[in-house]
Image (cartoon, rainbow, N blue to C red):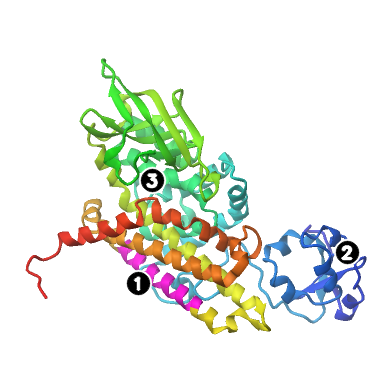
Amino acid sequence: MPQNKELKTFEEAEVRKHNSAEDLWIIIDDAVYDLSRFVDLHPGGAFPLIEYAGKDATDAFYGLHRQDVLLKYERYKIGTIIGRKPQIQLSEPGAISKVPYAEPNPWQGFKSAYYTESHFKFRDAVRKILDPLIEEARQYEDSGEKPSDELVQKLGAHGILAANVGPGPWLNAFKLPGGIASSEYDYFHELLLHGEFARFSAPGFTSGVLGGMTISIPTVLNFGKPALKAKVVPEVFSGRKRMALAITEPYTGSDVASIKTTAVKTPDGKYYIVNGVKKWITSGHFADYFSTAVRTDKGISMLLIERSEGVDTKLIKTSYSTSAGTAYVTFDNAIPVENLLGEENKGFYVVLSNFNHERWSMITGAVMAARVAVEECFKWAHQRKVFGKRLIDQPVIRFKLARMVSAVESTQHWVENLTYQMNHMNYKEQSKHLAGPIALCKYHVTRMLHDVSDDACQIFGGRAITKTGMGRQIETLQRTYKFTAILGGSEEVMADLGIRQAMKNFPTSARL
């Protein structure tokens, strides 16, 4: 709404006079809208507006529209009703939701053994940075276009790209949101950060901006030679360059040992000649660098391959947006031996090194995605009326909400416990003690998402299978939650890994 627009006040009787298609006013909450010029432009046709001409249309509006429609058409607002106070709070960027279970419980007045003032400051600052970007993110999700360099570099300037990779010395180069010192940044800060991106309900966009980078840049941070790190890391964390992890092939997914892409050293020992293909590579279509698993003479190795002649990428259309840049990648080029990550023929260790963090980061975002669904369903159940009642007044709906909330809250606490362990273990200890529990938690999270999505769809009905409007977040969840069940290790592999890890610690003397 223009800043210089003067709003007036009206008696309800005055509004009732404007009750025709040619002269049409309505009331929504305490606000008066003159829709006379909008009648023929209304996407739903003229009839729904004419039906409420001169009347209070609050319940009817919220039965069909989200709040952002009011913001989109705020130019038609002409004033307010005398003596009426607003009953509906409009969402504001950066605000904490007051809907029960819409936020982790420390943000709803409960005590926490995990979160400190630092975490509250960080989350508050991150939300104020990211909330204004939600609409732009969803536009990319819908259009399937590459997220802009400007947007990615804005995240880089705030230190948000680097913060997605977890605690480490790389954060020293950035001023983190909320004024958080890099030395105090821990895995709970990162957990909150992943959750804030999950609130976008734009998983393709988020994967395109963060997914490929988060799982690939650790291979350079931890295994790259100093000169390579000095060049690549600042470019990626600033958003000037983008990066992808290229492991999966058309022939193999979880079975990394079976990859067929080859790297053969030249006679002078200065280059590797790389030939092969990779598939389903997140952000690969946009990537400038590829951390790539290859087969060398005596095993698996990892190479950093820069986009150049001999690197070709083709976009793959998946269930979520092509803004993820999911790609089929072909390699036929020469790579300097200095781009070897780790030791030759010992790349399997490099591949495995980030699996725990990758899976943990996936489940942190997934829990918040489920929590968004809980909030959406709570709101919808209170404002949707059928058979003369609100949905929330139906016991079957309350049961579905109870099942959703119970699943989300219990999962949240498991994830927080794992995060606490990560904060108090070094990398070697995490690898030994947490690979199994994180795998089992990932398996549990994907089953939880399945159940939450299913209940949410039943609560929203036809709107849950419609990409726009009231059910858009639920439609996105039900269409894309299986990514969490497949990427980073399938459900079945995770469940088996978790139990196999537990078997290692099973006491040989134990009997019933």
Asked which secondary structure carries label 1, the reply is loop
Image side of residue 474 versus residue 12, left or right: left
Chief secondary structure of the magenta portion? helix
Q: Is residue 357 magenta?
A: no
Q: Is residue 415 magenta?
A: yes
Three-letter residue code for mark 3: Ile
Give the quarter of the figure containing the N terminus.
Answer: bottom right
Camera-near label (1 vs 3) is 3
Camera-near label (1 vs 2) is 2
Residue wearing tag 1: 113
Q: Where is residue 475 in the image (x, y as percent from the top left)?
A: 57, 60
Give the quarter of the figure containing the C terminus.
Answer: bottom left
Three-letter residue code for mark 1: Ala
Q: Position of residue 75 (x, y in %)?
A: 80, 60
Residue wearing tag 3: 215
- At a point 47% along the width and 58% down the height, the residue shown is 481
> Quick one: label 1, few (<14), some, or many (20+) residues within 10 Å?
few
- At a point 38% along the width and 41% down the height, the residue shown is 217
